[in-house]
Image (tube, rainbow, N blue to C red):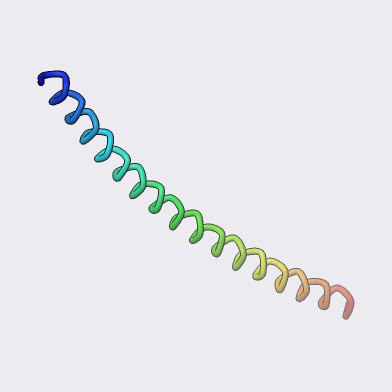
Amino acid sequence: MVIKNNLEKSVNNLEARIKELEQSNEGLRSQFKYLEERVGASEEETKVKQEIINDLEVKD
């Protein structure tokens, strides 16, 4: 009976830890998606600025 109780406690602890890890993983995915979007926006901004610079250089 003691072994069964210990096993049940271990299973409950593992299930709780799995839920914590899943939540953490979801948070990390959300942060990663946000960073991907920021990088994409930054790359687009850099591209536009480079095109402006190129246009100005051609006019000189």
Quadrant of the image for the N terminus?
top left
Locate residue 5, reporting x and y percent.
13, 26
Horizontal side of 19 relative to 60 (left or right) equals left
Residue 19 lies, with reference to residue 34, above or below; the image says above
In the image, 53 versus 18, the foreground residue is 18
Give the farthest residue toward the front. Answer: 1
Instruction: Give the total number of marks visible in the rendering.
Output: 0
Residue 24 lies, with reference to residue 50, above or below; the image says above
Locate residue 32, reporting x and y percent.
50, 54
Give the farthest residue toward the bottom. Answer: 59
Horizontal side of 15 relative to 28 (left or right) equals left
- Which of the 4 quarters of the picture holds residue 40? bottom right
Residue 27 lies, with reference to residue 5, above or below; the image says below
Locate residue 37, reporting x and y percent.
55, 64
In the image, 33 versus 60, the foreground residue is 33
Quadrant of the image for the C terminus?
bottom right
Horizontal side of 50 relative to 24 (left or right) equals right
In the image, 13 versus 8, the foreground residue is 8
Q: What residue do we see at 71% from left, 71% from top?
A: 49
Locate residue 14, reporting x and y percent.
27, 34
In the image, 36 versus 58, the foreground residue is 36
Q: What residue do we see at 76% from left, 69% from top?
A: 50
Q: What residue do we see at 71% from left, 73% from top?
A: 48
Give the farthest residue toward the left. Answer: 1
